[in-house]
Amino acid sequence: MSTSLIENTPEDITPKDDAFHGSIKRLAAEWWYFDANFDNGYAVHVGCMTYSKKKRGNVTQVLDIYKDGKLVFGKKRKHKFKHFQASKQMPLVKIDNKSFIEFDKEKYEKNGDWIYNVSLKLEGQEVNLTFIGTTKGWKIETDRESWTVAVPKASVTGSLTLNGKKINVNGTGYHDHNWNYNLKTLLTYGKGWYWGRAMSRNYNLIFAKIIRFRSQSVLLSIINQDNNGYTNVNSKDIIINFKNLIKINRKKVPSKFEINIDSVSNEIPIKVNVLMEAQEIHYERRLLFMSYYRFHVKSSGSISVNGKKEKINDIQILELLKFR
């Protein structure tokens, strides 16, 4: 029997987990996702999605640039699959022989560092960014869909080029990688999912709510500590409330999110109280049956692990994907 992504527990990873997996049995989607928020008010999403079976399909590069949460540039570029080159041993993606995602293998082998260089230019707008992981990555892998959060939290530096102006940037970011998502995924995930995160000085909270059929849902939350490991929270101890519904594209979506956790994991008490308020919402239609919302949220509250409490006060990205 197939297992559900959300019902598995996180495991340690190697660079191969963030390499290209591909699909042999059926057409399936696989993607690398990077985002970052910078201290000058800019934010970016840089992504790459393949939709393929064996050696047939296509690949799409995505670049979204935001200023104070508002989209100032957003474009996609689709390529034939024959122009896509990727390693199955480590994170390395090239398109038309141009490096797009490059993992620093030398520093990983020497120090165990997870460092990525991400470069993309679309219609004259450009990003050249370095993501340096500051905490331990993990994966949730099944015999069907899989999710690797290679960099739950990163220090991000580099530059944006917007309308001919080069802008140096510095901030924090995130990187994950999903693969083997196909039409059967709809049977598992039903209506879609919410995903997001919040950060304090040393802690990083990642959460997801999978919305299934008949109003059922499953919750997930994992907490990372800088320069340390991760803790999986029992789903029964997670409460996520959605408030202040607003209408976007004739659909109601929440503009406030509350996350509360009171749990004990491996004898370590964990308490989380987070309020996320949407500052801006970026909506886009994906295919004929998907609606995607990217929220820029102001987060406040606290995370406490083993009695050590830290305040949350930052801007982060949260997403909602609706299949139907």
Image (cartoon, rainbow, N blue to C red):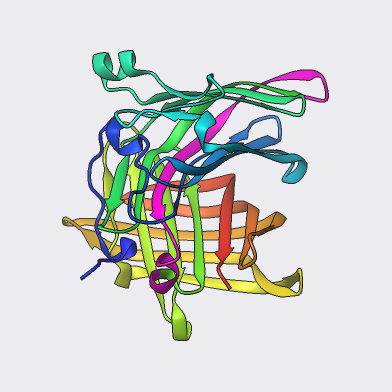
Query: Can I make out residue 67 in this image?
Result: no
Height in image: 117 above or below 7? above
Residue 109 pos. (x, y %): 25, 17
List the single residue furthest toward the left. 267
Q: Residue at x 73, y 41 (%)?
A: 74
Q: Which residue occupies 46% across, 47% down? A: 52
User: Where is 19 relative to 221, above or below?
Assistant: above
Visible in this render: residue 222? yes
Q: Position of residue 282 (x, y in %)?
A: 71, 54
Q: Is residue 143 magenta?
A: no
In the image, the segment drawn in magenta is 162-188
Give the quadrant of the C terminus. bottom right
Q: Residue at x 62, y 73 (%)?
A: 243
182 part of magenta stretch: yes
> Taking 150 as reference, is 238 above or below it?
below
Residue 112 vs 322, above or below: the answer is: above
| Predominant SS of the magenta segment | strand
Picture quarter with the N terminus: bottom left
Residue 254: percent from left, percent from top: 64, 69
